[in-house]
Amino acid sequence: MKHCDVFIIGGGPAGSIAGAKLVQAGFNVKLVERQTFPRFVIGESLLPRCNQLLAEANMLESIENAGFQFKGGVAFQTPGKFEIYHFADNLGEAHNSSFQVKRELFDHELLKDAERKGVEVEFESEVIAYDPEANIVTVRTKQGDIERYQAKKVIDASGYGRVLPRLLDLDSTPKLALRRATFCRVEGDIRPADGTDGYIYVDIHGDNDAWIWNIPFNDGITSVGVVCTEEFFQSKNMNESEFWDHIIDTTPAAKARYAHAKKINDVGFLSGYSAAVKKLYGSNFVLVGNASEFLDPVFSSGVTLALESGSVAADLTIKELNGETVDWQVEYEDYMLRGINVFREFVTAWYDGRLQTIFFADDKEPRIKQSITSVLSGYVWNPKNFFVKNSGRAVDTLVSIIEAR
C-alpha cells in the first residue's frame, strides 16, 4: 500500500491546476493519467476567467511563455446580422483577454508546470477500482502491475473517462438535449483583417439548425467544428466528412472564409457529449472538470469550468487537510452549480433562439452588453451581473422588451 495526501485521477486542466495548488501548499500529490501527453482533445478556445485562475495558481506565466494565439473576444454572425463582443468591454473584470490553444499543447504545458512544482505524475496507468470508505484507489500500471494508494482526499479529474461516476454509479441524465460536434483542422483560411483575426467567430447555419466554431491558432491552422442535434445530422444522410463540407459550403460566411482552405486531418466527431452527475462530492472524494458536468461547446465554457472546479476543490482540500471545517455542499457544489447554471441558461437560450434576439438587437444598453460580455468572458459568479443573479428571468425579460419595441 502506498500513501499520499491527495490522489488525482486525470492530467487535464482541472487535475493540473488542483495538483499545482496543493503541492504549493505543502501537500504530497500523486496524479495518474491513463494516456500519454501530448494527446488530442477538443475544446480549444479559452476565456479570460481562465487567465485569472491560472495566475492565482502561479501557472499563467508558463502559458504566456508558450506563445499561444491571443484571443480578445467573440463574434456571432448569420446572413444580415453581425455582433462582436470585445472582452475588454466587460463589467470591470480582472482579465479581459485569453488564448486560442491547441489543447494537446496547452494541457501538456499545464501538466509539465504542475510536475515542475512537485506533483508526482504517472502516465499510461488506469484507475480500475475505488473504495470510498477506506479511500483506497487501485491502479493498473503501464507494465500491468496492480498498485493501491491510500489518500486523504481523491480528486477525480478524469474528463470524458468519468472514472468515479462510472465506478460509483454517479452518472445522471443531462438537462440539455444531446448534440454532436463534427470537426477538423484546416490551413489557408481567410481571416478578418480588422484586428479580430484571433477572435473566435461563431457562424449560425440555416434557421439555427447548426452553428460553426472558427478557432484560429497562431501557426495559421484553424479549428472548425459544426454543432447540431443528432437528428439534424442524420437527416442529411451523409458521413461526417460530407456533412462538414456541406455545412461549410452552405453557410455564406464560412464558405467565404474557407474558399481556399485545405483540411490537414480527417474529420472527427463527438456525439452525446453533455454529461451530469447525481452529486459532485463524497466524504473522501470530489469530482472536477468534465468528470462532473459538461454542458456544450458554444460558449467555450469547458476549460473555464474545469479550471474553476479544480481550483476551488484544491482550495477546499487545503483547508480540510489543515484541520478546518469545510461545507462541501455550500462551498463547492452550490458554488459550482451557480456558475454552471448561468452557462446552462445561456446554452438553452442559444438553441431556442432567445439569445440571438438579445445578441443581435440594435439598441442594447451599454450595461446589457457589458453584462453579456462578462458572461462570455467566463465571469459567471459575479453578483453584480444581473445575468448571474437570475439568468433565466434576465434573458426572458430582455427578450420581451426587445420584441415589444
Image (tube, helix red, strand yellow):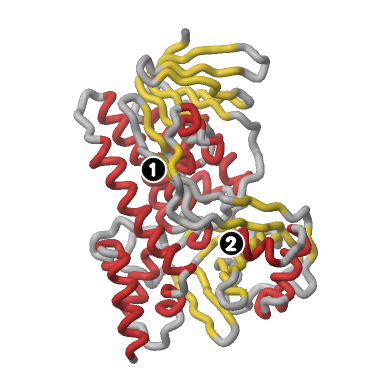
Is residue 391 among what the camera can see?
yes
**Percent x, y of residue 398:** 32, 78
Is residue 258 left or right of 92 when viewed as pictured? right
Task: Report the Cα–Cα distance between label 1 and label 2.
Answer: 28 Å
Query: Which residue ends up furthest to the left in the rendered image?
Result: 325
Q: Residue at x 62, y 46 (%)?
A: 41
Q: Residue at x 67, y 76 (%)?
A: 251
Neighbourhood count class around disc 1 (C-alpha, 10 Å): few under 14, some 14–19, many 20 upward: many
Q: Pick whichever, 96 or 363, lies toward us.
A: 363
Is residue 79 left or right of 3 when viewed as pictured? right
Q: Residue at x 58, y 66 (%)?
A: 198
Neighbourhood count class around disc 2 (C-alpha, 10 Å): few under 14, some 14–19, many 20 upward: some
Q: Is residue 83 above or below residue 222?
A: below
Is residue 92 left or right of 84 when viewed as pictured? left
**Percent x, y of residue 152:** 35, 20
The C terminus lies in which quarter of the figure?
A: bottom left
Amino acid at the residue labelled 1: Ser
Q: Residue at x 56, y 66 (%)?
A: 200
**Percent x, y of residue 328:** 27, 35
Question: Which of disc 2 and disc 1 is earlier in sequence?
Answer: 2
Report which residue position mark 1 lands on.
Answer: 309
Report which residue position mark 2 lands on.
Answer: 229
* Badge nearest the viewer, 1 or 2: 2
Is residue 4 among what the camera can see?
no
Q: Is residue 381 above or below residue 384?
A: above
Amino acid at the residue labelled 2: Thr
Is residue 155 left or right of 141 when viewed as pictured? left
Q: Secondary structure at mark 2?
A: strand
The quarter holding residue 145 reads top right
**Percent x, y of residue 57:** 39, 41
